[in-house]
Every structure is written in structure tokens, then in C-alpha cells.
């Protein structure tokens, strides 16, 4: 409760500060214009009520159990639509005010010019130009709202395939060219209907992977959300099967029920602190799955998952770990298990909001997670000399049903002998 209170106070102060700053600037623009003056009364009400909306919703409603999915989505969507665009607007206004302040300071340092006896046409022209720029600026302020609307209506389900090739030193020749299809963080409760899950699965199947894996968070908070994704999951197939692990949200939804329904009603087989070994033309592919550790949960038991696995004396093996949270990489994998070659995970969603344009990559998740999206290659004291981590950006969403710049992801990993 203490952390929730601290988070709530911080969120209220942050949203109030951003919205208050935008309001002050809007008031300056709207007051002299009768056609806009009426907006100020509405804005004042929203200014003092909206910062309390989200903490109040969490506090007053057991929303993870009783609130309809559509009501949750609408609430979070409207909250995001109100606040997210205000951030770039506030930054632009701050830049504008900074330039204005710098100009005033420079003007004070210059010698004052002689005052004209009559108002000049240049002065009137400058005033007219300033008013035009002001109107243009507030018109442009609509663009962030359009961007958020685009993120809700299009980017939210604009699935992107990321093809990743791993050059693995001394990879067994039998595994050269093996393909692994990964999806993660379906969050069934974030879908309005079955269509997005079907689309994601169809895109994955079109890649024809040898192995399909799902790295946790099948639901948001309720096992009753599963029916919205079960029809799509039933269609999954691959030569080496369909495998998965659990995420933190699956525990919120009473894990035994989630596990039972996934096992009984889909081809998916969950590895919960367990492993499965494939024999492929004399080489061994060890697929290892842990329960979730991270985000205040500690259910993973990697020693138990590896129990009975002996190193191949000829090195004809590859160890692939499915673990939901990327923090598990630094917590246990890298310090104690250099023989794990590749870990696939999800959890971060890439932050859902960010920028990925060529080498320019940043997402909100970067504020919390050192490894937040994509491929990470790191040295390891093992025979191969390196370990790989891949963080999937997820399919569904948590919180606001919104993605801006971080598209939902389907991954195809191809192993290559280096």
C-alpha cells in the first residue's frame, strides 16, 4: 500500500504540473477570444479532477475482477487520450517560453533605441505576425491528439515481424538454419474481440518456424479472458511443437486455471521450471522454461528446470531458455549459467510508447529496464564465449490500450553456425 500511495501522489503531481502548464498557456490565448473563452471553465474542472481519476479508479474498484473489459479499455483509453498528447505540447510550450525569456534578457542588455513618435506599420505587422504564429501553434497542438488516436486505432494492432539471425559459434551443424517463432504478452483482456489474436497467429504461421514459443502473460488479470485468444492458439503448430512459460499476469489470474485451460484446449505445452530435449540428427536442443521471477514475484527455479541435463562432451547441444522477465537475465542467468546460449523473454512491451527509427531507439521501458527490446549479445565464460538475450515487444497491451512508435511484435529467430 505504501508503494501504491507513493506512485499515486507522484502521478497526481506530475499530471497536474503538465496539465496546469498547458492550461496557463491556453488561458492566455483563449481569454481575449470570446469564441474560445467558454473552454476555460471546462478545462478548469478537468484540470483538478483528471489527475485523481486513475488513482481513484485503482483504489475504489476491484477492476481486475469485476469491471468489464470494454469499460476498462475505454477508461484507460480516454485517460491516455487526455494526457499523453499534453507531454509534447508542454515541451513545445516550454521551448517557446524559454526562447521568449532569452529574447527579453538579450533585449535588456542592448541599448534602448529611440522611441518613435507615432506607431509604425512595422510594429503593427509584427503584432499581426505574432498572432498568426500563435494561432498556427495552437492549431498544430492538435497533432499529438491525432497521433494518439492513430496509436489507438491503427498502431495498436499493426503487427510487425522482426527477423533475427544469430551467428552462434560452434553451433551443431544439425541446428544450422533452425527457426524459432516467438510471440509474447498476448494479454487477452486487452483485445476487444478475437480478430487481433487470429491475425498475430496467422502471421506467425506464415513464417513456417520449426519451433513456436510464447513467453508468458496470456491474460491480464482474469482466467475468464482466455476464451478471446483460445481459438487462435488452437491453430498454432510447428514441427517441434508449441511451447511456453508463464508471466507475472498469469499469476494474478490464478495460475492453475490458466495452465489447465491452455494445456487442455490448445497445442501449447507449458514448461514450468522444466525442460524438454529434442534429438535432431545427433544434436540436442534443450528447451528450458521457468516460471516467472521479477516484478515482485519469485517463482522461477532454474536449478530444478535444468535437473538431469548433462553437458554434451562433444558440444553437440544448444540451450534455449524461456523466461518471461528480462531482469531474470542479470539476476540468475548471466551470473550462474553461462552454458545457456539464448534466452527469449518479453514483459516490457517496449514501453508501448517510444521511437524506433533506424539507429534511433528509445521506449518508455528504457526508464525501468536496461534491456528493454530487441537483441542483446554479451560475453560469457563459456565454450562459445557469448550469450544471447532477445526481448520481444509483445502482442497485447497493459494499462492504456495504446502503442505509439512501438509496434506489437512477432519474432522469427534463425540460428546460424558461425
Image: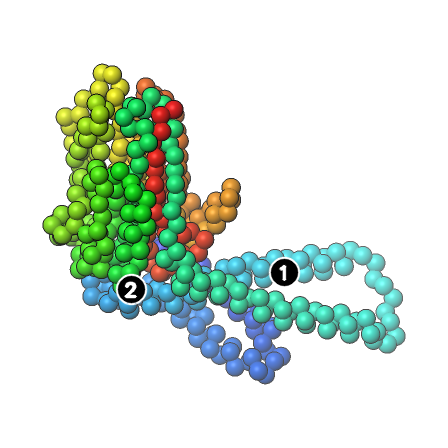
Tell me the tag on residue 96.
1
Residue 171 visible in the current orientation: yes
Q: Nearer the viewer, residue 91 or 381?
A: 381
In terms of image quadrants, where is residue 166? top left
Tell me the tag on residue 30.
none
Q: Nearer the viewer, residue 328 or 205?
A: 205
Q: Nearer the viewer, residue 108 or 215?
A: 215
Q: Residue at x 61, y 57 (%)?
A: 95
Does 259 sit above or below residue 273?
below
Tell whether 386 sits left or right of 234. Answer: right
Tell whether 295 sits left or right of 370. Answer: left
Label 2: how many Cα within 10 Å (few below 14, some 14–19, many 20+): few
Q: Residue at x 56, y 79 (%)?
A: 36
Residue 149: percent from the left, percent from the top? 44, 65
Q: Residue at x 28, y 56 (%)?
A: 197
Residue 375: percent from the left, percent from the top? 39, 37
Tell whether 193 sits left or right of 37. Answer: left
Colour pattern: rainbow
Which quarter of the rendering shows the C terminus? Answer: top left
- Tell me the SS state at disc 1: helix
Residue 51 visible in the current orientation: no
Q: Residue at x 48, y 74 (%)?
A: 43
Outermost residue toward the top? 313
Residue 109: percent from the left, percent from the top? 78, 55
Which quarter of the rendering shows the N terminus? Answer: bottom left
Does 179 sit above or below residue 185?
above
Q: Nearer the viewer, residue 196 or 14?
A: 196
Q: Are marks 1 and 2 in contact (CB under 8 Å)?
A: no
Residue 143: percent from the left, percent from the top? 53, 64
In terms of image quadrants, where is residue 171? top left
Write down the residue under mark 2. Answer: 192
Amino acid at each position: 500500500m505504501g508503494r501504491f500511495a507513493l506512485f499515486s501522489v507522484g502521478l497526481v503531481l506530475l499530471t497536474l504540473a503538465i496539465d496546469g502548464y498547458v492550461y496557463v498557456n491556453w488561458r492566455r490565448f483563449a481569454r481575449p477570444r470570446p469564441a474560445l473563452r467558454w473552454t476555460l471553465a471546462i478545462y478548469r474542472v478537468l484540470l483538478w479532477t483528471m489527475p485523481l481519476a486513475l488513482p481513484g479508479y485503482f483504489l475504489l474498484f476491484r477492476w481486475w475482477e469485476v469491471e468489464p473489459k470494454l469499460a476498462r479499455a475505454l477508461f484507460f483509453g480516454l485517460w491516455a487520450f487526455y494526457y499523453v498528447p499534453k507531454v509534447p505540447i508542454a515541451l513545445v510550450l516550454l521551448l517557446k517560453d524559454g526562447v521568449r525569456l532569452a529574447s527579453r534578457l538579450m533585449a535588456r542588455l542592448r541599448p534602448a533605441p529611440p522611441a518613435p513618435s507615432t506607431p509604425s506599420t512595422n510594429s503593427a505587422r509584427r503584432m499581426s505576425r505574432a498572432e498568426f504564429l500563435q494561432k498556427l501553434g495552437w492549431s498544430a497542438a492538435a497533432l499529438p491528439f491525432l497521433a494518439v488516436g492513430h496509436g489507438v486505432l491503427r498502431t495498436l494492432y499493426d503487427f510487425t515481424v522482426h527477423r533475427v539471425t544469430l551467428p552462434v559459434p560452434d553451433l551443431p551443424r544439425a541446428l544450422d538454419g533452425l527457426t524459432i517463432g516467438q510471440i509474447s504478452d498476448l494479454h487477452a483482456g486487452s483485445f476487444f474481440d478475437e480478430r487481433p489474436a487470429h491475425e498475430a497467429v496467422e502471421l506467425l504461421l506464415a513464417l513456417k518456424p520449426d519451433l513456436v514459443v510464447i513467453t508468458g502473460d496470456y491474460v491480464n488479470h482474469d482466467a475468464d479472458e482466455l476464451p478471446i485468444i483460445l481459438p487462435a492458439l488452437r491453430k498454432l503448430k510447428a514441427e517441434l511443437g508449441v511451447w511456453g512459460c508463464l508471466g507475472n499476469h498469469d499469476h494474478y489470474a490464478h495460475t492453475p486455471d490458466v495452465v489447465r485451460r491452455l494445456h487442455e484446449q490448445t497445442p501449447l505445452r507449458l514448461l514450468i521450471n522444466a525442460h524438454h530435449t529434442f534429438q535432431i540428427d545427433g544434436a540436442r536442443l534443450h528447451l528450458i522454461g521457468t516460471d516467472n521471477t521479477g516484478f515482485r514475484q519469485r517463482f522461477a527455479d532454474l536449478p530444478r528446470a535444468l535437473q538431469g541435463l548433462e553437458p554434451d562432451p562433444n558440444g553437440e547441444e544448444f540451450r534455449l531458455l524461456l523466461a518471461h522477465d528480462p531482469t531474470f537475465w542479470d539476476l540468475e542467468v548471466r551470473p550462474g549459467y553461462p552454458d545457456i546460449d539464448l534466452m527469449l523473454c518479453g514483459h516490457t512491451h517496449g514501453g508501448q510508447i517510444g521511437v524506433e527509427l533506424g539507429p534511433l531507439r528509445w521506449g518508455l521501458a528504457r526508464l525501468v529496464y536496461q534491456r528493454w527490446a530487441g537483441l542483446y549479445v554479451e560475453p560469457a565464460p563459456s565454450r562459445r564465449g557469448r550469450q544471447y538475450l532477445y526481448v520481444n515487444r509483445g502482442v497485447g497491451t497493459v494499462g492504456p490500450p495504446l502503442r505509439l512508435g512501438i509496434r506489437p511484435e512477432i519474432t522469427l529467430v534463425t540460428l546460424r553456425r558461425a
